[in-house]
Image (cartoon, helix red, strand yellow):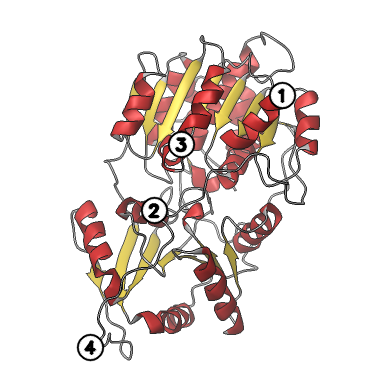
Amino acid sequence: MSFTELGLRAEILRAIAEEGYTAPTPIQAKAIPAVLAGRDLMAAAQTGTGKTAGFTLPILQLLSTRPARQRGKPRALVLTPTRELAAQVEESVRTYGRFLPLKTALIFGGVGMGPQVKALKAGVDLLVATPGRLLDHVGQKTADLSAVEILVLDEADRMLDMGFIHDIRKVLALLPQQKQTLLFSATFSDEIRALASGLLREPQLVEVAPRNATADLVTQKVYPVDKARKRELLIKLIDDHHWHQVLVFTRTKHGANTLAEKLDKAGIRAAAIHGNKSQNARTRALADFKSLKLNVLVATDIAARGLDIDQLPHVVNFELPNVPEDYVHRIGRTGRAGASGHAVSLVCVDEHGLLRDIERLLKRPIEKLVVPGFEPDPGIRPEPIENGRRGQGPRPERRGKPPARGAQPGATPARGAAPRPNRGPQRGEAARHLSGSRHR
């Protein structure tokens, strides 16, 4: 199947072609016709399958081919759990809608509200937002959701994990009853099914990957090592294998900062990204990592689903997550859209139980390799793992706190594409697939 068979208008097909894509991914091939037909949708797909384009493309088609009920008010609303994901969705809309006369606005916390208010007043067709900041605007009467025709809940399971359910219900109460609703989730948990049952009308179900499946093209390895020597081993692996772009996960923000500083001192260009960093710092670090100005990006689980990095070759679990499902989301940052990837976990004696839980979830063991000179000391006893809370991830945004300084993207004409960063070497695919990994 090609994109020309999906019934998309010429302007959208032109944008897709200019990005170098010809064939839709499985989630796109199933979701796009359903959305264009006006169906509610409940879709599950593993990361890297192109789900973002699976809803942005048909929404652009629908908004551009039917008249607005009320001019200037948002006609489509996409809710996301994190700032990073919101920015990537909005960028996807601008990229594929750049030849259409549609406007989009990006709304999230951590930055000033002024530019956002200005963007909303200028008129918006498609609004991408995190729940907390959106409710701030509603409370200040700077956002009017009464004309929303299409609602998207992206990473719905993550929003529930982060405690957004009450905010989501408040937003739902502000929307028209007659609307099309699209729910995207990594998994169909019981909580997600309960949310969907009260929200969706006879939804079409789309599931293109088994529950908690890991990408087939990701090679997974475990390196047993003492906790005190993890950093030393990581440096050796990066140097010996000439890894030029590595996403490293830690459990805590402090651990991410410390590791990034130590790597930098060892001559490996590194930066940390987590919830305590300002939005400007997070955006700058991510841009530098994508353009290879940085070799290593050290992240907490705020990045497990939010970051989207084109052709990321290596993911390292410097520390295993407490929740085994988070392992799947972490390593899903690599091996996306047909590209091969490598996931490495540095596991000390304290984490043997966590590793067993992950292997139980995957229903198979992960290959173990001991690096000569880094053999674990059998005399070391396991100690309890210190972690602030189970399943650490980004906390829900607090509304009403003073915003951090920094520029905020506002309403941007869809035709005004952003400058393209250096993507590094490209894959030599014959038919390019349009996936989330390309939404820079």
Q: CA distance from mark 1 to mark 4?
A: 63 Å
Which mark's residue is nearer the viewer, 4 or 3?
A: 4
Which residue is nearer to you in this view: 220 or 191?
Answer: 191
In the image, residue 358 lies at what x, y percent? 26, 58
Which amino acid type is marked by label 2? Answer: Gly
In the rendered structure, which amino acid carries the disc numbered 3? Lys
Q: How far across and how far down the image is residue 391, in percent?
A: 39, 53
Write down the residue under mark 2: 391
Q: Is residue 11 above or below residue 405?
A: above
Badge 1 vs badge 3, beta-carbon distance below 8 Å: no
Question: Which numbered tag is attached to residue 51?
Answer: 3
Left or right of 219? Residue 51 is: right
Q: Give yes or no for contact between labels 1 and 2 (Cβ–Cβ under 8 Å).
A: no
The answer to which of marks 1 and 4 sits earlier in the sequence is 1
Question: Which residue does the image show at 26% across and 85% down from the upper left?
Answer: 380
In the picture of the structure, the residue carrying the numbered disc 1 is 124
Quarter of the picture containing the N terminus is top left
For the residues labelled 4 and 3, the Cα–Cα distance comes to 47 Å
Residue at label 4?
379
Dot 2 crowding, Cα within 10 Å, few <14, some 14–19, many 20+: some
The residue lying toward the viewer, choosing from 214 and 15, is 214
Q: Residues within 10 Å of mark 4 (few under 14, many from 20)?
A: few
Instruction: Estimate the spatial distance between the alpha carbons at disc 3 and disc 2, rounded to whole Å.
Output: 24 Å
Q: Give the quarter of the image for residue 333.
A: bottom left
First along the sequence among labels 1 and 3: 3
Of badges 1 and 3, nearer the viewer stands: 1
Q: Assess whether mark 2 and mark 4 are in contact (beta carbons under 8 angstroms).
A: no
Q: Earlier in the sequence, mark 1 or mark 2?
A: 1
Q: Give the CA separation, mark 1 to mark 2.
A: 36 Å
Residue placed at 58% from the left, 38% from the top? 89
| Of pointers 3 and 2, the one earlier in the residue sequence | 3
